[in-house]
Image: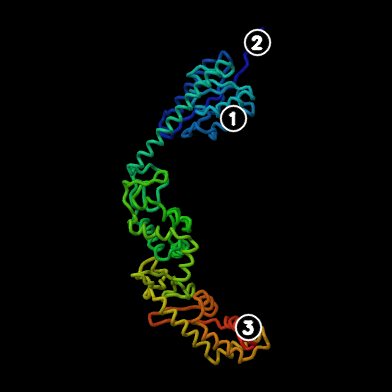
Amino acid sequence: MTVPTRKLRCAVYTRKSSEEGLDMEFNSLDAQREACHAYVASQKAEGWISVRDNYDDGGVSGGTLDRPALQRLLSDIEAGLVDVVVVYKIDRLTRALVDFTKLVQIFDQNNVTFVAVTQSFNTTTSMGRLILHILLSFAQFEREVIGERIRDKVAASRKKGIWMGGPVPFGYSAENRKLVIREDEAGVVRMVFERFLKVGSATIVAQQLNAAGIMSRKGKAFDKGVLYKMLGNRVYLGEAVHKGASYPGEHKAIVGRELWDDVHAILKESPRTRASKTRTQVPALLKGLIFGPNGQAMTPTHTRRRGKLYRYYVSMSVLKSGPDTCPVGRIPAAEIEAVVTEQLRQLFRAPDLIVQTWFLARETNAKIDEQDVREALFEFDTLWEQLFPAEQARIVQLLVERVSITTEGAQVSFRTEGLERIIQELRPAQSDRVAA
């Protein structure tokens, strides 16, 4: 009686590190697979048969086990669907000795044999395991040598200013493995450096860019983290950077040395110090309240000439689309703020406003009389110049609803209900002085 030969299900695994050539009609994976299936066919008398599935990892490094086809193969092994793993060469399975040891343990636990068809090894024998370990040691050594050569090549190329790939910085495009300036994005980069030099705050610059509808290459809004990376990227200075060292690059600079040095002189200060300077040096009483003739909001900005600060409110349409979009594209901040504050101070002396404010205040405090309101408003008028800019801005936000700029002047709309809160804040101060 003839004993039937036990069928051994053979899974063929192939791998190629790079994607180069995979789109060819007959590529490296096809050659490996064909050789492996031919070897399995030669062992038909031993009961070897190929499973239907192919396990192909194209463009995946052998330095990791996190490979889609390999993980699928291991799942099938643990499910008891595979008896023999067949590869063209040992290093197609892995180049790392530690990883190979892990794989052999999985194979042993599931009674799976490993075969390399061009090296004629079988992990079921002790001699086969010994030779496999020796070969894998050489494979790992080869991988490390290749890695060192690549790192040395990258370092040498960087020192020559050659761009070696990776994410293309905003402001450039990659053409023929070289960085080429994209003028549309380069203009934004220069704007970021110039505005940061003026305001000293990446947060404010990000707000201005987003308000103007300027987005990143992926259509996302800029934030201060992205801007700080941009401000610190020496690629914009025309340099190539490698491990903290910079070298003259092949590509053209977007930002000049003088502008770079001025910006980085500011960056040396702590963000807290810069924020404090920004708040004290660049007050903006009408932020969020002032609008141009075309209805577009106007945003505060400033510049310095010969050490002197000049502040303005600029129409957002001008920032976004150019000066022709608004008949009054820019207005001096000091002038319009003086107009608004003077109208406020006149408002405090108006008899009808005093009566109106008194009626509003009585709704929350029945004991308050008209004289209290009158004295509080007159007191506020005399105290205005002594207030800090931040407090002046808070009061303006309470009392002013909108400042509309026209070609003929400015129209100011007030919130009389905000006066009630100011009256309540001033009355305790008056009571203290009377008691004293």
Q: Residue 103 falls in which quadrant of the image?
A: top right
**Horizontally, is 75 left or right of 334 in the view?**
right
| Number of numbered discs | 3
Provide the secondary structure element on which disc 2 rests: loop
Towards the viewer: 426 or 46: 426
- Where residue 320 sits: x, y (%)? 40, 65
- Secondary structure type for disc 1: helix
Give 203 or 37, whichever is nearer the viewer: 203
Q: Residue at x 54, y 15 (%)?
A: 43
Marks 2 and 1: CB-CB under 8 Å? Answer: no
Q: Residues within 10 Å of mark 1 (few under 14, many from 20)?
A: some
Q: Nearer the viewer, mark 1 or mark 3?
A: 3
Question: Label 1: which residue?
Answer: 74
Could you tell me which secondary element the residue under label 3 belongs to? helix
Q: Please identify the quarter of the rendering in which residue 166 is found.
A: top left
Residue type marked 3 = Pro
Earlier-in-chain disc, 2 versus 1 = 2
Q: Residue at x 54, y 85 (%)?
A: 380
Q: Position of residue 327 (x, y in %)?
A: 36, 75
- Answer with the quarter of the image where residue 304 lies: bottom left
Q: Nearer the viewer, mark 2 or mark 1?
A: 1
Nearer the observer: mark 2 or 3; the answer is 3
Q: Earlier in the sequence, mark 2 or mark 3?
A: 2
Figure check: 342 above or below 201: below
In the rendered image, residue 150, in percent from the top left (x then y), is placed at 40, 35
**CA–CA distance between discs 2 and 3?**
108 Å
Residue at the spot of label 3:
428
Labelled disc at residue 141: none
